[in-house]
Image (cartoon, rainbow, N blue to C red):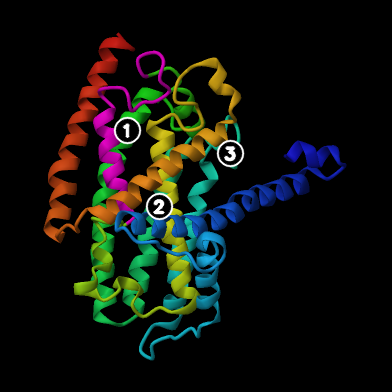
Amino acid sequence: MTETFISWGMDPNWAWGVATICGILLIALPLMLAVAMIIYADRKIWAAIALRRGPNVVGPFGLLQSFADGLKVFLQETIIPTSANRGLFLIAPIITFTVALMAWAVIPFNSGAVLADINVGLLYILAISSLGVYGVILSGWASNSKYPFFSAMRASAQMISYEVSIGFILIGVVLFADSFNMNEIVKAQQGHGLGIVNAFGFNLLLFPLAVMFLISSLAETARAPFDLTEAESELVAGYQTEYSSMSFALFWLGEYANVLLMCTLNAVLFWGGWLPPIDWAPLYAVPGIIWLFAKILFFFFVFSWVKATVPRYRYDQLMRLGWKIFLPISLLWIFLISGYLMLTRYS
């Protein structure tokens, strides 16, 4: 895109700046629309599983329900508790929302179609996703209320616990792909499974890591059955209890942007990203972005399906799963993968 602006006679520095801004808008604006649509899809899936109709009044088939909800919160008054730390109280949802968008900068939507094609893309995502804890902690502490504070403590412990496992799981992917670059990780999956399937997930050494990554994604985004940060019977509405109006909406948007990000990472890291499922020439006629969106929608359906059917874990079960099961298994798997690659690829 930079070259296009330069060909129009624009100064190279200005061309780079304008191209970057256009790239950000091309990701951020459709992402916000996608968030509105997946909230609607989420509610429709829950309704179908519970034999209900779901949103069906606002717009055709209820498609405009999310926009109506957005307008409602936009028109509400922003109430700040008297004893809250005003500055931190207001900046916490902004941090959550901003961090949720920043990670998309290195996601490849097609071959070369990425805003920042950096060599350490996977490390960038790990670093950015870790920053999301700060928005949660600040919102709980700045509210100066015990229930949001307890929820913030739970959320931070939960996110940190599962980020440790996710870090070790991703080492296995990096070892096989031999790169931290997201584009290279996708390309390394071409024909990887049995010589015909474009996915790391069909590798017997990586399939258990793919399953653990999916479950850890649910925990990282505080989705059911790991939604203990918003356990209604214990913590009212979690760290968002004191929030209203657009500050509450920013938490909501950030949460669903993170859900979409985790669905995308599942698709990109283990299931071929923008590659077709089978390494067969006619399938490559379909644009890569279509394959990626199809995989994202599949994983989002799995997220909604789990939320609608699986009962919530107890907190001790959540911590036990993260520290006593996923962490040792992911460590063991790194040794197995390293040994296998030393015997086969580097012997």
For the residue pair 308 and 250, the one nearer the viewer reads as: 308
Q: Is 328 on the left or on the right of 207, as rendered?
A: left
Q: Is 97 on the left or on the right of 30, as rendered?
A: left
Please give the label number shown on residue 259: 2
Find numbered disc 1 in the image and state the secondary structure of the residue it sits on: helix
Residue 74 against residue 213 in the figure, above or below: below
Q: What separation in Å lies between label 3 and label 1 (alpha carbons)?
A: 22 Å
Name the residue: 58% across, 54% down.
28
Please give the label number shown on residue 171: 1
Q: Is 45 on the left or on the right of 183, as rendered?
A: left
Q: Which residue is mark 3?
A: 114
The first of marks 3 and 1 along the sequence is 3
- Disc tally is 3
Amino acid under label 3?
Val
Neighbor class of circle 2 (other Cα within 10 Å; few <14, some 14-19, many 20+) is many
Amino acid under label 2?
Val
| Residue bounds of the magenta highlight | 193-221
Q: Can the viewer see residue 89? A: yes
